[in-house]
Image (cartoon, rainbow, N blue to C red):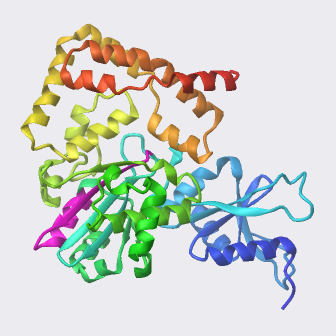
């Protein structure tokens, strides 16, 4: 066999570690794909297929996309069910002696997307992790783009419908499952038939108790059970640990952003079957599967992306606790009555950008200067938002206003660092 050129040998060494992903290999101003990846990408993305001399008898099939506009191409591949490994030059080509060092900076999967161009502003992008054992299950639904996870323990004679109900509540774009879930044909058949999501089977050895404890300690500290609400003897700990390890494998860095863990139980929310959800047309119509004509479409007058996502989650998860419902209604009444404060609050919120997702991209090191400035502009509006919310007088609004951190130090840093 002919000897590969040094660059192609480097490519082959990296590709061996990422056999199931399409490898975007950075060369100059392009991400190039070779061999089977090139054939797949050219077919799925309508790219021109060329060839590259790489030391072999035949030229290697090759195609590429400009690095400054790669996100759209990645989004199309993700939508078609592929995973994409991004291989970047990790040293300055001008200073490199010989071959430029390259390494994988992250693997993009349907449930780990953080790029604004690949996400919908008005809905969360959840990755689910399920650990099923007998009639019990631990479930974790995390939005990597906002750093928030929702967890619950299920215990039911008919565990399959209970799991399906939770999946319908969150509509994950990716599901991680333990081998025990494969025996639950009702759940796997439902996912395959009714959900447009990718599925990843996690090996049994990844659920070893020692590994699980170490993973949770690394993420949340030694007192993880107290700080997160994850039961030390429950099944959620297995689901959460599997999710964290998967994120470390694919995202390489930035996983520390996942810090907010919200525990819920099925008694908090109205239980709606998949059929009931569809017939009520809460967030999509039966016929066209679109937002227009739904309850969400009627109610959504929100000013921010974060508000749009929160309203959607409230509609998909109706409260059943009268005290919590009345607290919301009192806040709505206060806003309705205080028309001037409401108008000022609406005006202020109109200048608030998506802090949740901006913070994530900054932590991952993928934010542009424009996005950092957007965070600064949002920080500048926080005093006004806080004052107007408190002025409305409702206990819930006052409580929320008290929780707002004005982020003055962040604003100062951004103003010092950026020049318009």
Asked whether residue 126 appears in the rendered view, the answer is: no
Residue 243 percent coordinates (x, y)? 42, 63
Residue that lies at the very extreme toward the right in this rendered image: 97
Q: In the picture, residue 100 is in which quadrant?
A: bottom right
Q: Nearer the viewer, residue 409 or 265?
A: 409
Which residue is painted at 7% across and 37% down in the image?
A: 322
Q: Residue at x 27, y 66 (%)?
A: 138
Between 92 and 239, the residue placed more toward the observer is 239
Please give the name of the residue rendered at 83% of the width and 70% of the height, measured from the top-left corner. 7
Is 238 one of the magenta-colored residues? no
Of all residues, the one furthest to the left in this rendering is 322
Q: Which residues are magenta?
A: 146-168
Residue 201 falls left or right of residue 333: right
Q: Is residue 155 magenta?
A: yes
List x then y, in percent, for residue 66: 71, 52
Name the residue furthest top: 340
Q: Is residue 404 above or below residue 230?
A: above
Q: Is residue 363 left or right of residue 5?
A: left
Relative to 217, say whether 322 is above or below. Answer: above
Percent position of residue 420, x then y: 68, 21
């Amino acid at each position: 066999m002919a000897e590969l050129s040094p660059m192609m040998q480097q490519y082959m060494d990296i590709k061996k570690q990422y056999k199931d992903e399409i490898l975007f290999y950075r060369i100059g101003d392009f991400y190039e794909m070779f061999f089977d990846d090139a054939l797949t990408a050219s077919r799925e993305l309508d790219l021109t297929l060329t060839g590259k001399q790489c030391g072999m008898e035949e030229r290697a099939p090759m195609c590429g996309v400009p690095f400054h506009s790669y996100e759209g191409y990645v989004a199309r591949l993700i939508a078609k069910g592929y995973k994409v490994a991004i291989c970047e030059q990790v040293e300055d080509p001008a200073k490199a002696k010989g071959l430029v060092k390259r390494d994988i900076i992250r693997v993009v999967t349907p449930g780990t997307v953080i790029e604004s161009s690949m996400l919908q502003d008005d809905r969360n992008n959840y990755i689910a992790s399920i650990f099923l054992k007998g009639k019990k299950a631990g479930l974790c639904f995390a939005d990597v783009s906002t750093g928030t996870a929702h967890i619950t323990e299920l215990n039911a004679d008919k565990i399959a419908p209970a799991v399906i109900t939770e999946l319908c509540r969150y509509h994950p774009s990716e599901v991680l499952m333990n081998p025990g879930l494969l025996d639950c044909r009702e759940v796997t058949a439902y996912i395959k038939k009714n959900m447009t999501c990718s599925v990843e089977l996690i090996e049994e050895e990844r659920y070893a108790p020692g590994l699980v404890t170490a993973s949770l300690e690394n993420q949340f500290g030694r007192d993880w059970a107290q700080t997160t609400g994850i039961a030390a003897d429950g099944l959620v700990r297995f689901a959460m640990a599997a999710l964290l390890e998967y994120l470390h494998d694919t995202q390489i860095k930035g996983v520390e952003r996942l810090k907010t863990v919200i525990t819920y139980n099925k008694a908090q929310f109205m239980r709606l079957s998949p059929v009931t959800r569809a017939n009520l047309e809460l967030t999509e119509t039966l016929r066209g599967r679109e937002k227009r004509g739904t309850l969400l479409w009627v109610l959504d007058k929100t000013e921010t992306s974060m508000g749009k996502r929160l309203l959607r989650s409230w509609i998909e998860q109706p409260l059943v606790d009268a005290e919590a419902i009345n607290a919301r209604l009192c806040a709505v009444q206060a806003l309705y009555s205080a028309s001037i404060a409401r108008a000022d609050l609406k005006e202020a919120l109109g200048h608030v950008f998506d802090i949740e997702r901006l913070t994530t991209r900054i932590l991952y090191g993928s934010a542009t200067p424009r996005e950092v400035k957007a965070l600064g502009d949002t920080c500048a509006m926080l005093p006004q938002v806080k004052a107007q919310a408190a002025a409305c007088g409702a206990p819930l609004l006052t409580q929320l206003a008290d929780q707002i951190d004005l982020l003055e130090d962040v604003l100062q840093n951004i103003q010092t660092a950026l020049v318009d």
